């Protein structure tokens, strides 16, 4: 990223309809619509205990919950969506912003109320918040029985035995090699059409606003053969689109295992046979020509034009890049420890559009970062004008404990100023959303049907290659169909059209 963010959403509700329509499950950005989703999969008769698991945060957390459910299915647990039926409650947590932590704390209180009628019930916290607040949750507040960090899920069977015997259990050790590549995840409340496939874990980019390197550890990549096997299985099971997922997918690097930072010490043979993200993307595309492929999230300092050329070569790789810019000011980018200048960023986005003219580009922007001036803010507005993003995720800065910014910088931009600057950024992005969406009108484009439109039971909803939401009359089509749609009209966030037949991708 790698840009997992620390932001306050309260000031962007005026633009909520546009943003929420644009937030898709592929984005690493937090989707407010799915927070607190409970996982449920088909149970096994031999399993006698019930697991209730809720997920919060980014797509990585939801993907991790699928891994956890898979592990515990072999340990005698079926999933349930009824809290009162649970024997074990797990909450997969986010530590990115304060609102998420406060929501989770309220949920923990509710879980513990259920213990009065189910005294054998055990409660555990998973993920990033577990890593950051392990001592507080267990020893000070005594509100959970078990704390499990994001690299310790394979230790869950042992930890459950500990809490069953009446002892608290904790494992928050960060791993140098765990990728869960050998775990076949269950699929979280899936539509049977789209799925995540994790390819990296951790992050080496020490952005000063981000807590991810401290909660998910150093960056390591997953064996490409295990990725190909998982994608093949998904395709055979009827899935039509996968998203290659990581904190920073462009820095994917497999050379036989180990941390990315240790690649400099690899043998000549390892270096010669290493697989980078561009090669992995092509391997997945060639092995699954009928499967749509997306990826998230990219980092400007790590993305190479080889990735864009690979996208241009294969029509099953979707034409969308999520490329967080964070600020248009070089001074603020330096304060954020973003290892790119705005000039380098512009050069990259300009080249993307030259190589792949139909590619959409989306952004993350933080406004009100410590010491940000009106001049810095104006530079961000100029960056928006230069790129004219198809859509974006815009937030005001809020300090997160444990980050370099939280430790070393004063949150000195007044809240009113943050909100005003954010509203100006959103207004400009809104105009660019409309500008980009209008360019699709009049064209026939392939759309993958993902489900029923939220606004009409008589319309399907899907996305085109650029990740723009499309709605059209249902007629005889069904979920999972690839349909050619004539785009006749649009709002700033949604294309409206009519199906003219199946695409050749079915």
Image (spheres, rainbow, N blue to C red):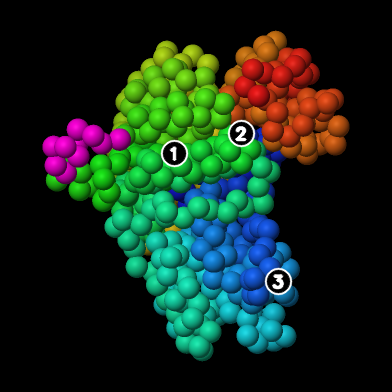
Asked if residue 407 is among those painted magenta in the image, a careful observer would answer no
- Residue displayed at 66% across by 42% down: 192
In the rendered image, which residue does mark 3 sit on? 83
Q: Secondary structure at mark 2?
A: loop
Q: Report how many numbered discs are placed on residues in the image.
A: 3
Q: Disc 1 and disc 2: Cα gap in Å?
A: 15 Å
**Residue 217 figure quarter:** bottom left
In the rendered image, which residue does mark 2 sit on? 240
- Residue displayed at 46% across by 55% down: 183
Q: Quadrant of the C terminus?
A: top right
Q: Nearer the viewer, mark 1 or mark 3?
A: 1
214 lies above or below 336: below
Q: Position of residue 447 (x, y in %)?
A: 67, 24
The one of 153 and 406 positioned closer to us in this rendering: 153
131 lies above or below 302: below
- Residue displayed at 59% across by 72% down: 76
* Sooner in the amino-acid sequence: mark 1 or mark 3: 3
Mark 1: give few (<14), some (14-19) or many (20+) Cα within 10 Å: some
Res 291 visible = yes
The label shown at residue 228 is 1
Q: Position of residue 437 (x, y in %)?
A: 64, 21
Q: Residues in magenta?
A: 266-275
Q: Position of residue 288 (x, y in %)?
A: 51, 29
Res 209 visible = no
* Sooner in the amino-acid sequence: mark 1 or mark 2: 1
């Amino acid at each position: 990223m790698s840009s997992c963010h620390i932001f306050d959403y309260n000031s962007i509700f005026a633009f909520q309809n546009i943003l929420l329509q644009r937030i898709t499950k592929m984005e690493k950005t937090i989707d407010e619509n799915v927070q607190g989703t409970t996982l449920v999969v088909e149970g096994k008769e031999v399993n006698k205990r019930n697991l209730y698991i809720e997920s919060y945060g980014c797509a990585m957390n939801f993907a991790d919950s699928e891994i956890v459910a898979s592990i515990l299915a072999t340990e005698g647990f079926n999933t349930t969506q009824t809290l009162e039926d649970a024997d074990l409650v797990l909450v997969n947590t986010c530590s990115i912003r304060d609102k998420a932590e406060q929501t989770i704390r309220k949920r923990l209180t509710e879980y513990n109320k259920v213990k009065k009628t189910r005294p054998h019930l055990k409660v555990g916290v998973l993920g990033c918040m577990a890593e950051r607040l392990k001592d507080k949750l267990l020893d000070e507040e005594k509100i959970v029985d078990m704390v499990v960090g994001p690299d310790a899920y394979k230790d869950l069977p042992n930890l459950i035995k500990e809490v069953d015997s009446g002892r608290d259990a904790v494992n928050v050790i960060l791993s140098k090699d765990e990728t869960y590549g050998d775990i076949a995840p269950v699929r979280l409340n899936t539509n049977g059409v789209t799925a995540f496939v994790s390819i990296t874990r951790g992050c080496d980019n020490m952005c000063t606003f981000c807590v991810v390197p401290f909660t998910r550890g150093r960056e390591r990549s997953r064996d490409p053969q295990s990725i190909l096997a998982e994608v093949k299985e998904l395709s055979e099971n009827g899935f039509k689109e996968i998203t290659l997922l990581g904190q920073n997918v462009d820095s994917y690097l497999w050379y036989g295992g180990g941390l990315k930072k240790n690649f400099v010490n690899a043998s000549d043979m390892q270096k010669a046979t290493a697989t980078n993200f561009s090669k992995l993307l092509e391997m997945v595309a060639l092995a699954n020509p009928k499967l749509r492929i997306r990826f998230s999230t990219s980092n400007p300092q790590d993305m190479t034009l080889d990735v864009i050329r690979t996208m241009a070569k294969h029509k099953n790789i979707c034409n969308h890049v999520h490329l967080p810019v964070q600020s248009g000011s070089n001074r603020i980018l330096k304060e954020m420890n973003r290892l790119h200048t705005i000039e380098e960023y512009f050069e990259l986005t300009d080249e993307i559009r030259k190589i792949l003219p139909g590619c959409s580009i989306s952004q993350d922007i933080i406004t009100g970062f410590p010491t940000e001036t009106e001049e810095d803010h104006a530079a961000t507005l100029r960056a928006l004008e230069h790129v004219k993003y198809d859509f974006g995720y815009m937030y005001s800065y809020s300090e997160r404990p444990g980050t370099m910014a939280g430790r070393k910088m004063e949150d000195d931009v007044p809240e009113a100023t943050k909100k005003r600057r954010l509203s100006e950024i959103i207004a400009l992005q809104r105009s660019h959303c409309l500008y980009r969406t209008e360019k699709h009108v009049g064209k026939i484009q392939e759309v993958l049907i993902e489900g029923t439109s939220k606004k009409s039971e008589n319309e399907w909803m899907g996305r085109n290659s650029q990740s723009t939401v499309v709605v059209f009359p249902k007629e005889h089509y069904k979920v999972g169909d690839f349909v050619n749609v004539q785009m006749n009209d649009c709002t700033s966030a949604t294309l409206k059209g009519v199906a003219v037949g199946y695409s050749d991708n079915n």
